[in-house]
Amino acid sequence: MLTPDFVKTKFEQALPYDEYVASGQLHEQDNWKNQYERVAFTDQQAKLLGSFERQVNALFVSGTWCGDCVQQMPIVGKIAAASNGRVNARFLDKDKNMDLADHLKICGGHRVPVGVLLNEDFDVLALVGDRLLSKYRLMAEANLGGACPMPGAPIPDNEIAAVTQDYVDQFERAHLICRLSTKLRQRYGD
């Protein structure tokens, strides 16, 4: 069960984005850095992320070797950077953290990247990942093609933009859950 104590302990063991990327092999690091540079926010997205008032903690199980991870986690890293410290994203290698990965199965299987969005008390707000809606739509459009892209495979700009919007939406939803929570508003005086 994803109790606040369990996820807080895992969160404290996890690495911030840059340290996580640096834990991979050199060619993996290059793929992540190249994708990070391609992620761009619209003015509206940047304004929204910069306006967050509540802390959203994000804990992802991932793999620096994983094609879906290299496509998506740089987006999460940029969201954290754009949020003025309100999104605190941390990352763990799935294979070294099966105790957490077992709680984050999707469709009965271990997938990456998968994350849990948490409030400042480490209560679960949402599970996100594997692939978000725009990615599944693109895969279905391609007749349910390959299950996992190769790391470093070309990614169209419109796909990056669509997945970025999906992640911004997920973090906005988590932030609004926090902002509108009676319990949290009473506890934190807002």
Image (cartoon, rainbow, N blue to C red):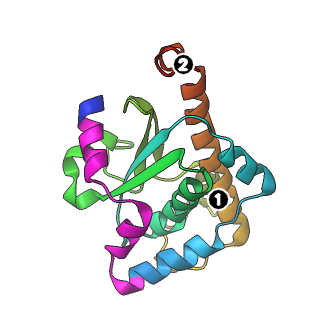
Apparent side of residue 100 relative to residue 130 in the rendered image (left or right): left
Magenta region includes residue 51: no
Determine which of the numbered discs, if any, sits on residue 189 in the image. Answer: 2
- Quadrant hosting residue 65: bottom left
Q: Residues within 10 Å of mark 2 (few under 14, many from 20)?
A: few
- The three-letter code of the residue at mark 1 reads Leu
Q: Is residue 14 magenta?
A: yes
Q: Quadrant of the N terminus?
A: top left
Compared with 169, 35 (above or below) is: below
Residue 79 found in image quarter: bottom right
Mark 1 or 2: in front is 2
Prevalent SS, magenta region: helix
Magenta segment, which residues? 6-27
Q: Amino acid at mark 2?
A: Gly
- Against 54, residue 71 (above or below) is below
Residue 138: which disc?
1
Q: For residue 95, what is the image quadrant?
A: bottom left
